[in-house]
Image (cartoon, rainbow, N blue to C red):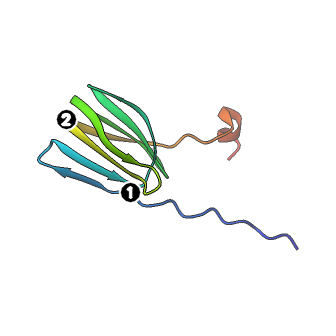
Amino acid sequence: MEKQTERPAAAPHDLILEGRSHLTVTGVRRVLRCDADGAAIETADCLLTLSGAEISVTALDLERGEAKLSGRFDAFEYAEARTPGGLLRRLLR
């Protein structure tokens, strides 16, 4: 009999915004992009896109899964994480 492998539960993530200028994100896998106008952060279950002004990463600890950013944050947007394997694999799910 074959053992079915369970997918590990996605690590939770939190956003802690202080005064609209200091942001801590937990559950971070990697920072895909960060420039003065925004950032894109991959978490275990989604893609988080930030927009604003003068945004920069002030600390990044991928072992703990934590990123600290500063700047002026205007918007946060979540998108579904991409499924590995391309379009065909997503269609056949």
1 vs 2, front mark:
2
Residue 21 locus on image (x, y percent): 16, 41
Rounded to the nearest whole Å, what is the CA distance between mark 1 and mark 2? 20 Å
Check the image and name the residue furthest to the left.
19
Q: Residue at x 42, y 55 (%)?
A: 27
Check the image and name the residue furthest to the top.
36
Q: Quick check: 6 above or below 25?
A: below
> Where does the N terminus fall, quadrant-wise?
bottom right
Marks 1/2 in contact by CB < 8 Å: the verdict is no
Q: How many marks?
A: 2
Q: Where residue 71 is drawn, which disc sits there?
A: 2
The answer to whether residue 21 is visible is: yes
Q: Residue at x 51, y 59 (%)?
A: 10
Residue 59 locus on image (x, y percent): 32, 44
Q: Nearer the viewer, residue 77 or 91?
A: 77
Residue 62 locus on image (x, y percent): 45, 50
Query: Which of the marked residues, 1 or 2, is nearer the chain's N terminus?
Result: 1
Residue 29 locus on image (x, y percent): 48, 48
Q: Nearer the viewer, residue 55 or 3?
A: 55
Check the image and name the residue furthest to the right.
1
Does 3 sit left or right of 71 as displayed?
A: right
Does 38 sit left or right of 85 as displayed?
A: left
Q: Which residue is mark 1?
A: 13
The secondary structure type at the circle numbered 1 is loop
The secondary structure type at the circle numbered 2 is strand
Q: Residue at x 27, y 33 (%)?
A: 56
Q: Amino acid at mark 1?
A: His
Does 22 sit left or right of 14 as displayed?
A: left
